[in-house]
């Protein structure tokens, strides 16, 4: 893989999760543009720089030792990439301790570098949280590849930070440079909430939760077909989002034991709050993680999953395939993985390569619900 060359460092970076013959690199021209812009500012060695949404550490590791750098984002995989890339480039794995997006930032910061996230609600929440965290004369600079940079990103920066100047495009990347100005404190519109009729529950959703404004149609198709009569089964909600699958299942299976895991810290925060609001002090494990990578082999009886088909702006079935493999490893012999997926994704044939039996539980014109038995 090519090295990242900038005025600050030359880095050898890998993506997370790793895959053989990785077709994508762990940085892009927007990272290079941000770092070149930063170098042109000639920051003082003691200046405090906050990096937001640094995919795999390209920005933060480049700046390490040059300024006092902090990093925050909503991706467990991003944090795992940061740790691995620190080691890969001769630093201690904990040389930078990132802050999950679900936790508050501690300023003041002299400069904020932002990779514009796919979810603009996350960007909005992050900009709101910068209120009172910027030092006098601070600059806030966002970057993205032009094809992934909506006009609304600049509008949000103007609303919450101050006047925005858009740079010329370089290698199909662009910067948005905001000059902070005094503004009245803004209240965050997050988390949002919506109600379901069946089961009759209210779900809270922090800014970066998938389908934050309402239940996605795949999960809506899945809910009526969740397994029942599970007894004391050990159940995992893999890629739990706001926790709706686990919560709906738990209401039907009062003696089952649940683990909810997602790679988004805001999803895990939402799921934990929703579980407590609906099920009180009933025990559950709710954690951020790389899917079921940390799960003991043969420690689960059932896995529920509405698999993603994208990682940030990258579309593909790699993450879903990896989740299926993780589920197989974690399930006992005879255990079952239940999934919902778009018909055209062909999950039936993929699951048949891993599991000894795959059956269609139900279908709609757009989705299939499948049960794969180990």
Image (spheres, helix red, strand yellow):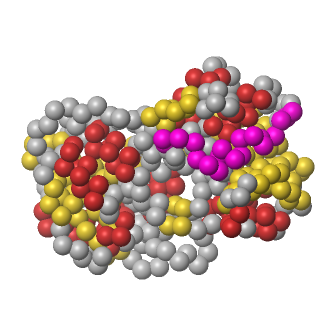
> Given the current orientation, which residue lies at the most extreme front position?
365
Residue 296 image offset from top left, x and y in percent: 74, 46
Vertical position of residue 28 compared to residue 226: above or below: below
| Residue 314: in magenta span | no
Vertical position of residue 342 compared to residue 124: above or below: below
Q: Nearer the viewer, residue 57 or 87?
A: 57
Report whether 332 appears left or right of 21: right
User: Which quadrant, please, contains the C terminus?
Assistant: bottom right
Can residue 18 be seen here? The reply is yes
Can residue 65 be seen here? The reply is no
Q: Residue at x 32, y 73 (%)?
A: 29
| Residue 223: in magenta span | yes
Residue 328 image offset from top left, x and y in percent: 78, 56
Q: Nearer the viewer, residue 104 or 204?
A: 204
Report whether 125 appears left or right of 42: right
Q: Residue at x 78, y 43 (%)?
A: 225
Residue 142 image offset from top left, x and y in percent: 26, 58
Residue 364 sits in which quadrant?
bottom right
Vertical position of residue 190 compared to residue 294: above or below: above
Q: Magenta segment range? A: 212-230
Q: Which residue is drawn at 46% across and 64% down?
A: 313
């Amino acid at each position: 893989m090519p090295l990242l060359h900038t005025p600050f460092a030359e880095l050898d970076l890998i993506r997370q999760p790793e895959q053989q013959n990785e077709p994508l690199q762990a940085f892009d021209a927007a990272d290079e543009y941000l770092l070149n812009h930063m170098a042109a500012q000639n920051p003082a060695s003691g200046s405090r720089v906050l990096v937001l949404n640094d995919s795999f550490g390209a920005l933060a590791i480049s700046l390490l030792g040059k300024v006092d750098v902090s990093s925050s984002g909503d991706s467990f995989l991003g944090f795992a990439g940061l740790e691995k890339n620190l080691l890969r480039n001769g630093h201690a794995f904990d040389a930078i301790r990132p802050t999950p997006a679900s936790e508050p930032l501690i300023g003041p910061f002299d400069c904020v570098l932002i990779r514009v996230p796919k979810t603009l609600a996350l960007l909005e929440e992050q900009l709101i949280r910068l209120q009172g965290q910027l030092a006098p004369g601070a600059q806030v600079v966002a970057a993205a590849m032009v094809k992934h940079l909506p006009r609304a990103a600049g509008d949000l920066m103007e609303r919450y930070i101050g006047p925005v100047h858009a740079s010329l495009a370089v290698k199909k990347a662009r910067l948005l440079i905001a000059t902070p100005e005094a503004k009245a404190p803004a209240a965050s519109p997050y988390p949002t909430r919506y109600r379901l009729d069946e089961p009759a529950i209210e779900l809270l959703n922090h800014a970066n939760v998938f389908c934050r404004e309402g239940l996605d149609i795949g999960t809506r198709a899945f809910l009526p077909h969740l397994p029942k009569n599970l007894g004391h089964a050990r159940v995992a909600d893999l890629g739990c989002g706001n926790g709706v699958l686990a919560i709906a299942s738990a209401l039907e299976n009062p003696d089952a034991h649940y683990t909810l895991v997602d790679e988004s810290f805001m999803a895990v925060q939402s799921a934990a709050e929703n579980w407590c609001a609906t099920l009180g002090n009933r025990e559950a494990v709710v954690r951020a993680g790389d899917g079921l990578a940390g799960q003991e082999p043969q420690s689960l009886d059932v896995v529920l999953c509405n698999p993603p088909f994208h990682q940030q702006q990258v579309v593909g079935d790699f993450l879903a395939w990896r989740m299926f493999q993780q589920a197989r490893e974690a399930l006992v012999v005879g255990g079952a993985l239940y999934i919902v997926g778009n018909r055209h994704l062909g999950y039936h044939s993929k699951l048949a390569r891993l599991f000894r039996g795959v059956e269609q539980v139900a279908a709609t014109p757009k989705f299939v619900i499948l049960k794969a038995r180990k």
